[in-house]
Image: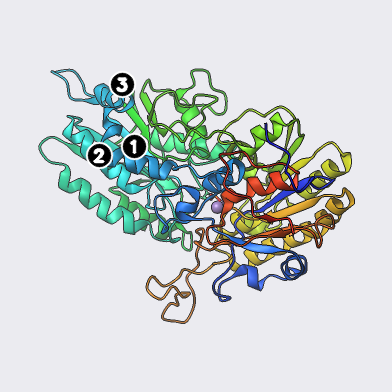
Amino acid sequence: MLQKHPAFAGVQGPVVVIVLDGYGIPKHDVGSAIDAARKPTLDRLLAECPNIRLRAHGTAVGMPSDDDMGNSEVGHNAIGAGQVYAQGAALVANAIAAGTIWEGSAWQEIVAATRAGDGGKAGVLHFIGLFSDGNVHSHIDHLKAMVLRARDEGVRTVRIHALLDGRDVPETSALEYVVPFEAFLRDISTGGFDARIASGGGRQTITMDRYDANWPMVARGWRTHVLGEGPQFANAVEAVNGLRARHPGTIDQDLPEFIIAEDGKPIGTIEDGDSVVFYNFRGDRAIEITRAFVETSFSEFDRVRHPKVTYAGMLQYDGDLQLPKRFLVAPPAIKNTSGEWFSKMGLTQFACSETQKFGHVTYFWNGNRSNKFDGETWQEVPSDVVPFEQRPWMKAAEITDAMIAALQSGQYKVLRCNYANGDMVGHTGNFRAATMAIEAVDLALARLLPAIDAAGGVALITADHGNADEMFELDKKTRQPAQNPDGSYKAKTAHTLNPVPLILYGKAAAGKLKLRQTDTAGLSNIAATVANLLGLEKHETWDDSLLDIG
Ligand SMILES: O=C(O)[C@H](O)COP(=O)(O)O
Ligand SMILES: [Mn+2]
Ligand SMILES: [Mn+2]
């Protein structure tokens, strides 16, 4: 059990953690939607309340290096678990470097199903995944290593289904990946080995939906990858150029699907006897397409055909649901989360967000666990299914309504929510909309904070990583916002490497409680800080509390 704190009995009312998704602390005011936003509440909090900066990227959240930006998965894992685990990106890179990935039964079964046999028809090995080096969902180097290994182990035909990124990497960078990769595939396609990109499309158009927000997107991906339906091109370079010409101004993540065909026939439909590796390591956007492949009875959309394939995920995307059963690398085994221990202490917990971030504040928060702990209540506000630059307020008001109702009910001691705006609108690259997104969050806080005071509680206001703080690409050398020859700036859609704020709010804390800035302060220190605010000592596995009890 968590011990009573020796010096502090805890605040009388509830402790609320508010995650402003994608709200980093900007380095430059140029290109910062956070500087540009009118946000009187946040400005007042930063001026009047104890606040510090937290590290939210790189090794501080379990990424392979400090050049890696943070993301929602690793950020919410760190906040909820109070600890840093080596995350998917690092686990896969290590498994490839050490060669352990090839020794596992999953890889061997994938290869055995498609290896050229004596006379029998060898199947095709398909790789589907996000085609970039963003390292949030996937890394193209992992794909390269698997294609080479498959060739060396006797697979004859490889087909790649490339989801164009432009969201974790610059918004129109697809050809920087496609051109060298098609050249690499041509180089290695000798001696009877044949590897080619067979289909693809923008990641926000096909396949990579999450949290059941937009199944038609997954259906469209199925028709593309499995059935080979869509506009045809001779190769992926021509596809990207052709689609850009047909859809001027469309950034990579939003491009439509494409099919590579010869004489009108798609070169890489997925058939009985083939193997399929979904090579994203991150789960949220991998679960729906995985279900479409592995479930026998399936009613989310009409699959038309359900090929009998040997399917593997790069990781297991949901351990509780065992989805999928076959996976190449074991996911991090996250234990002793704050949700679990607060539950063991008999504390009631409330978690709320809108669909786009609902799994973040529940599943990721609880260490990738899809079931609730005792005493937990989860509330999902359905997200709009529209481009978020058209509705940058998203569901901030409705999440606030739900939080206020939960606070007024008096039923919960520990509450948490996620406002998706700064991140989801930040990913569109639309500066004006991102500014409005931050303003919507500020309005929401202006309503929520008085309800916390009325309940005698406190809030920790923070973020999981930056995004809206940098809406223009930075020059690689100077790290300043990069200008085009005509003086304009290039929009940036990805997360940032910036720290995030941690603000301690509440009349119940005023004057007595402060936050300690340390060199290493990061997201994984939040769980222990919450425990202290509840009058408890941290669990021994959690990183230190940042609460200064005066
Ligand atoms: O999946 C996405 O939308 C982006 O790749 C990462 O964003 P998130 O980590 O904030 O969800
Ligand atoms: Mn996020
Ligand atoms: Mn994001």
Q: Amino acid at mark 3?
A: Gly
Name the residue tied to disc 1. Answer: 127
Q: In which quadrant of the rendered image does the C terminus lie?
A: bottom right
Expressed as whole percent of the image width and height from the top left, the position of residue 411 reads 84, 36
Name the residue tied to disc 2. Answer: 147
Expressed as whole percent of the image width and height from the top left, the position of residue 302 reads 52, 26
Q: Nearer the viewer, residue 418 or 424?
A: 418
Confirm whether residue 27 shows in the render. Answer: yes
Expressed as whole percent of the image width and height from the top left, the position of residue 25 reads 59, 66
Does label 2 or label 3 sit earlier along the sequence?
A: 2
Q: Does dot 3 land on a helix, a strand or a loop?
A: loop
Q: Does dot 2 land on a helix, a strand or a loop?
A: helix
Residue at left offset 36%, top offset 23%: 309
Q: Is mark 3 within 8 Å of ligand 1?
A: no
Q: Which mark is residue 273?
A: 3
Confirm whether residue 385 shows in the render. Answer: no
- Residue 58 picture quarter: bottom left
Residue at left offset 14%, top offset 18%: 119
Q: Amino acid at mark 1?
A: Phe
Q: Nearer the viewer, residue 295 or 136?
A: 136
